[in-house]
Image: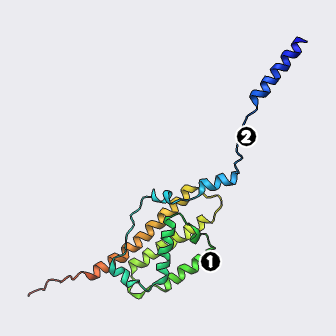
Amino acid sequence: MSSFFKQLILLSVLICFSCKSEPEPVVDPLEAQEKSYTIKAEDIEKLRYTDYVLSPESSEAILDWQLFQDLQGHMELLKSGNLSFFRVEKGIMEEFITELKMQQPPVVITPAIKSRMTVLETNLLRLQNLSNLDNIKKASLLEAIEELLIADANFKLQLNKKFEKEAQQIQLPVKIQ
């Protein structure tokens, strides 16, 4: 009998120590995944790129280019971690880009600016494609965001360069024979 009591006491001690007093919170795997893939403003602030502001001449030239103004608004939202503009169907994004190009003021149509517009278009479509994937890694998405921000900054820089160069009054030397 004494061995029975010893076994019973041992069993009750094991049960007491093996039971937890507080249950662990149940974490939904999808919720945990969403948190790890969510892009925040802090993540974007860590990206390395140089942002340019449009010069007064450039701003004046594109004042009536409404879709470019809209795009710049979406770029500001992107910097705060809002990817809603890019989570649309590909056809909608392609239509936006086509109209953006069609409404481009004639004064800013140069080969260099067209080239920068093509790079911007490519990066817009790439981020749109990646942001609509469910299993995309956060690092890949941040890389695409960084490339788009760089493309946008380079486009604004090219606009500034165009008007800066036009503002220069360069006189050629006169040849005397």
In x, y percent, where is residue 27?
Answer: 69, 48
Q: Amino acid at mark 1?
A: Gly
Question: Residue at the spot x=37%, y=84% of the render?
Answer: 61
Residue depicted at 85% across the width and 20% down the height = 8
> Extreme front residue here?
21
Numbered disc 1: secondary structure: helix
- Relative image position of residue 157 (x, y in whole percent): 37, 72
Q: Which mark is residue 91?
A: 1
Whether pointer 1 and pointer 2 mark residues with C-beta atoms closer than 8 Å, the reply is no
Q: Disc number at residue 120? A: none
Q: Tell me if residue 85 comes above or below residue 143 in the rendering.
A: below
Q: Closer to the camera: disc 1 or disc 2?
A: 2
Give me the C-alpha separation between circle 1 and circle 2.
49 Å
Q: Is residue 151 left or right of residue 161?
A: right
Give residue 42's position: percent from left, percent from top. 49, 57
Relative to 76, does residue 99 appear above or below in the rendering? Answer: below
Quarter of the image with the N terminus is top right
- Picture quarter with the C terminus: bottom left
Q: Which residue is the site of mark 2?
A: 23
**Residue density around tag 1, few if under 14, some if 14–19, many if 20 or more, within 10 Å:** few
Q: Residue at x 40, y 70 (%)?
A: 154
